Image (tube, rainbow, N blue to C red):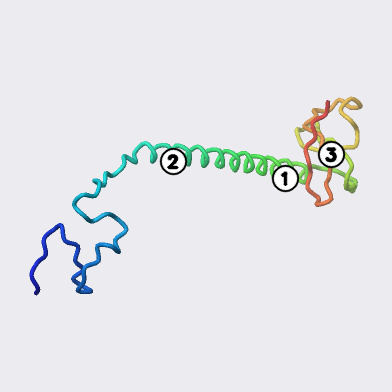
Amino acid sequence: MKDKKPDNVVYNTAEDKYDASLKPYPTHVGAPVIIAENLVPWKHKGVGMVNAAMAAEYEEIRKQYQSLQERFEYNTLVYSARFSFQPMVGHTYHLYKNKDGAPFLSILVPEECNFDHIGSFRLGSDYVWEKLELV
């Protein structure tokens, strides 16, 4: 092994040459001191921003899931109800409970009958029932 060079001499032993001018940082004794920055505040800010963004995205997905689950439950309820006609796409129908508590679908609006009104629904072109909010 060759003689060890002093610490202030930049010598590349693998290539057997001096390469101080090729380094991406200053190598001479008079160069300014390299001080590592305190990155903790930057990391905390980044973590906070990422957490807030992910929480917002999670909340949006949770609301979409709840909406999908609610639509599924309403469709299950309407399709399991009793009705003696073929519903037409785009028309509004009303879901009621009879005296026995069994659901049935009707064309009668809530003001025209005395049954327990569950909700009003419109049959979409994809045969998915959409719950309507009647005013």
What's the amino acid at mark 2? Answer: Gly
Q: Which mark is residue 76?
A: 1
> Tag 2: Cα neighbours inside 10 Å, few (<14), some, or many (≥20)?
few
Q: Is residue 13 above or below residue 82?
A: below
Q: Residue at x 69, y 42 (%)?
A: 73
Q: Is residue 31 left or right of residue 83?
A: left
List x then y, in percent, for residue 47: 42, 40
Q: How far apart are the two marked residues, 3 and 2, measured between alpha carbons?
A: 54 Å
Choose between 35 and 10: the one closer to the eye.
Answer: 10
Q: The N terminus is located in which quarter? A: bottom left
List x then y, in percent, for residue 23: 29, 61
Which corner quadrant of the image does residue 59 belong to? top right
Tell me the SS state at disc 1: helix
**Is the C-beta separation of discs 3 and 2 under 8 Å?**
no
What's the amino acid at mark 1? Answer: Thr
Q: How far apart are the two marked residues, 1 and 3, measured between alpha carbons?
A: 13 Å
Q: Is residue 49 above or below residue 113?
A: below
List x then y, in percent, for residue 45: 42, 37
In front: label 2 or label 1 = 2
**Is the C-beta separation of discs 1 and 3 under 8 Å?**
no
Q: Is residue 48 left or right of residue 75?
A: left
> Tag 3: Cα neighbours inside 10 Å, few (<14), some, or many (≥20)?
many
Choose between 123 and 95: the one closer to the eye.
Answer: 123
Tell me the SS state at disc 3: strand
Q: Mark 3 highlights which residue?
A: 105
Q: Residue at x 21, y 55 (%)?
A: 28
In front: label 3 or label 2 = 2
Q: Mark 2 highlights which residue?
A: 46
Q: How far apart are the two marked residues, 2 and 1, measured between alpha carbons?
A: 45 Å
